[in-house]
Image: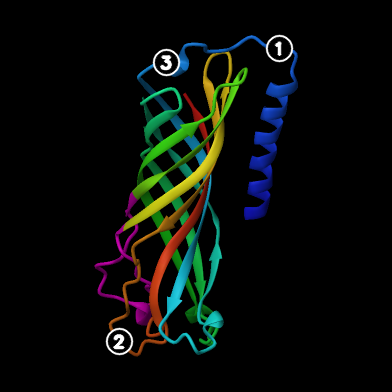
Amino acid sequence: MKKLIILLALGLLTQSVHAQLFSKERLSNLETFDAKFLTWGYFLGLNSYDFKIEYKDELGNTNTDVIVEPTTGFNVGLIGDMRINRYLNLRLEPGLYFTQRNLIFPRIGDEIDALREVKSTYIHLPLLLKFSTKRLNNWKPFVVGGISTSLNLSSNEKNPEDNSLGQFRTTRVTNYFELGFGVDIYLYFFKFTPTIRGVFATSDELVPDNNPLSTYTSNLSSINSRGMFINFTFQ
């Protein structure tokens, strides 16, 4: 599913760029749009989250300790864009991100006990710098990067129940850095922007089980979210 999403997004980007480069139409849409100091918009998109897991016992067969199965989630949010100069913009993109990751512990024989569903509803708050090229006809590529933090509304960090009662616990707040690319497409009435962005957590999200010898978390040193966002922006 993740590969299909990437291929579809790249197809849209390629098709849009091809249409703008080789179309005979050379009239510029929204000619004064980029001169505005502040612009607003909203985005819809898809996400796929994973976990990078570090183990305490690096000499053991740690590759089978935990298997992470990502699923495809949904994003929705707002955009505030501040123009710094012709090629640089500062962006705030608060959004609501719904996702789920399935953790499988192969060393646990029972199929039900071996599966833990980690459902997350994030309020995601990125602060990004957007570096754009010169506008060509009605399109303009860019790269974007920055930092972000998220508040997990589904977090069970304070839950006294742990994996012994079926609860895999993660922290409520996570910090990230982000990097991505996209293209602004200037249509007649609005600007449409498809983007692909990777996010990488810089803070540990593991809440260990109460029992230090727990089969689930005793060999886990840290877990860090990694994710890919495909967003479609309308401004």
Count of numbered marks: 3
Q: Nearer the viewer, residue 133 or 158?
A: 133
Q: Disc 3 residue type?
A: Ala
Q: Nearer the viewer, residue 178 or 235?
A: 178
Question: What residue is drawn where x is 33% and y is 63%?
Answer: 203
Does the magenta segment cover residue 167?
yes
Going by the picture, which residue comes out furthest to the top?
27
Question: What residue is drawn where x is 39% and y is 24%?
Answer: 85
Residue 82 seen in the figure: yes
Pointer 1 local density, CA inside 10 Å: few below 14, some 14–19, many at least 20: few
Q: Disc 2 residue type?
A: Asn
The disc, 1 or 2, on the residue closer to the chain's N-terminal end is 1
Q: Nearer the viewer, residue 31 or 113?
A: 31
Q: Overall secondary structure of the magenta stretch? A: loop
Which residue, given by chain and number where applicable, does mark 1 sit on? 25
Residue 166 seen in the figure: no
Q: Nearer the viewer, mark 1 or mark 2?
A: 1
* Residue 84 to residue 177: above or below: above
Pointer 2 local density, CA inside 10 Å: few below 14, some 14–19, many at least 20: few
Q: Secondary structure at mark 2?
A: loop
* Residue 97 to residue 222: above or below: above
The quadrant in which residue 40 appears is top left
Does the magenta segment cover residue 233?
no
Q: Secondary structure at mark 1?
A: loop
Magenta-colored span: 149-173
* Residue 29 to residue 197: above or below: above
**x, y (%) of residue 142?**
53, 34
Which residue, given by chain and number where applicable, does mark 2 sit on? 211
Q: Nearer the viewer, mark 3 or mark 2?
A: 3
Q: Which mark is residue 35?
A: 3
